[in-house]
Amino acid sequence: MSENLRLVSDLALILISAGVVTVIFKLLKQPIVLGYIVAGFLVGPHLHIFPTVTDVAEVEVWSEIGIIFLLFALGLEFSFKKLFSVGSKAFVTALLEIISMIAVGMLLGFIMDWGVVESIFLGGMLAMSSTTIIIKAFEDMKLKNEPFVDLTLVVLIIQDIVAVVMMVLLSTAAASKQAAGREMLDSIVKLLFFLILWFVVGIYLIPTFFRKAKKYINDETLLIISIGLCFGMVIIANNVGFSSALGAFVIGSILSETVESERIVKLTRSIKDLFGAIFFVSVGMMVDPAVLGQYWKLILSLVVITLVIKAIVSSAAAMLAGASLEDSLKTGFTLSQIGEFAFIVASVGVTLKVLPSHIYPVIIAASVITTFTTPYWIKAATPCYKWLNGKLSPDLKARMDEYCLLGRKSGDKNWGSIITYSLPRVLIFTVLSVALLFVLFDHLFPFIRQFEVVKTLPRWLFNSVCAISTILLLLPFLYGIVYNNVKTRQLYSEMSKKNKSNIIVITVWTLIRFLIAGFFVFTILVKFFKYTKWVILLVTLAVIIFMMFSSRTLKRFTLIESSFMKNLNAKENSEN
């Protein structure tokens, strides 16, 4: 059989077995994902009862594409605005749950004499719950209108984001061969920088393109453009040192904010289902019965930790975040399983040789067991609440109810609001300024300098043109760093009247923003001129003053900001 036909033969075996097994699982009312894993186990290289896949390496390539489409689909269903609109309760719940489970995983790893990196990522995988399984359970059990559901779903989204960050850190650990804090911190800062840059630039350009070319885009063209953007972002992410999964998630989240998001979801669903099935089948193919027999104690430990300790930890986290006892228990019991993103993290870790090879089948086995128990564990939350509620004293119940009501109240604005209200704007325009300087200094100006005509120009003239053009291009972004919009000015006025000491915070924060803007101008002037620092400081001050009183700069800034906000809110405006 030729090489091409061998691949076709393997795909035929994978898809036929997956189809047959998932039909059986549907009849048994079990999750389809588990059917895919079982199908992979049956046709994998470790079990020879049925015909087996001949080229596992080629299937792994296809499963990588499956990961890309799974993360792309997750991004399409993700919304930054929805995430930040739910308040702090979900963030606190997710943060406490993830930190606690990482601590449990580290403890278990140390007991087994694992290294720091392996132990941290074991805890991270234990913290991951299954969005797919939980949503399916909510639908089957008709729980979508329950009060705890919204809290649970947002916690799941935050867990998925943490899974993406974990894959980035795995790549860093693989590159540095250690869990050095400096490398990890650098990776997180680098990740935040590129996430802000990609999101802002993507929101500014992609919806504008769709709006301008709307009459030329049919379903076929939209599908091709969407998949092209997905793969393009995957390449960009890889080129700057991140995983392909991160690139797919980022472009999906950008497209989710466009008016075409629902069409894209419908058009790409079949492709996502196809390659997702191949990925989960490939997961099942990695399950080795010999490894499961060897590490059955570890598997049992992970199952007990997930079902018992994770339920307790998640419930406690939700209560500390301000949820009621009943909602906290239901949230905690619902989150008590190991999700499919743990497979992806384990797969990346094993491929990069950061995690031990046996962790992959062990995590899969623990996940399969805890997935089967999910609907029964959700049901168990109600009798557990009734039993616990009956044991509590009236005084303790009253205190818990008071704490819950306190968590629901919106907090009063304090001095921290002065900074947080304008911090996103400062971060966005700072990132854009850094990116613009990088493009100009490292790419555009060196490229222009290569031309013979430019080489004949005096050095001072070329430097002057470069400095002036850079400052002019940067002025709208610098204006955005120091600018206070109407809402910000109203907040500052309110906070000043409320407490005179807030005036100090406002003054200091304003000076910091001006210093950031001045730093960029100073950096440009230092790069191109060799005058004394005092002269350059005076010129920097003059540029900042000019910027603040320039109506042209204000107009350019307003145009940029209004275009961005128009694109960001286009989806909501089209629905109204």
Image: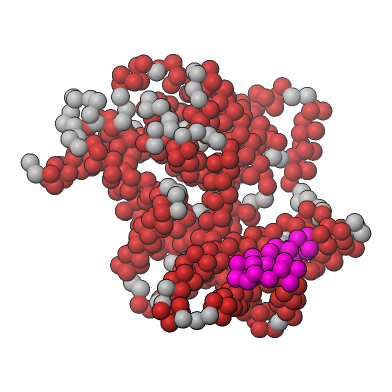
Identify the residue at horizontal 20%, vertical 43% (top origin).
11
Residue 82 position, x and y percent, is 58, 55
Would you say the magenta stretch is mainly helix, strand or loop? helix
Residue 272 position, x and y percent, is 34, 51
Q: Quadrant of the N terminus?
A: top left
Residue 548 position, x and y percent, is 73, 76
Q: How many marks?
A: 0
**In the rendered view, does 496 fall on the left or right side of 9?**
right
Identify the residue at horizontal 53%, vertical 63% (top origin).
438
Q: How is the image coloured?
A: secondary structure
In this orientation, which residue lies closer to the viewer: 470 or 457? 457
In this orientation, which residue lies closer to the viewer: 547 or 285? 547
The region drawn magenta spans 509-535
Does the segment drawn in magenta span residue 242?
no
Examine the rendered structure and indicate whether residue 16 appears above or below residue 472: above
Residue 543 position, x and y percent, is 71, 76
Examine the rendered structure and indicate whether residue 562 appears above or below residue 68: below
Q: Quadrant of the C terminus?
A: bottom right
Q: Find the residue positioned furthest to the right.
A: 500
Work out whether residue 420 can be spotted: yes
Examine the rendered structure and indicate whether residue 450 appears above or below residue 21: below
Identify the residue at horizontal 31%, vertical 31% (top origin).
286
Work out whether residue 137 can be spotted: no
Identify the residue at horizontal 53%, vertical 55% (top origin).
195
Identify the image quadrant of residue 326.
top right
Does the segment drawn in magenta span residue 513?
yes
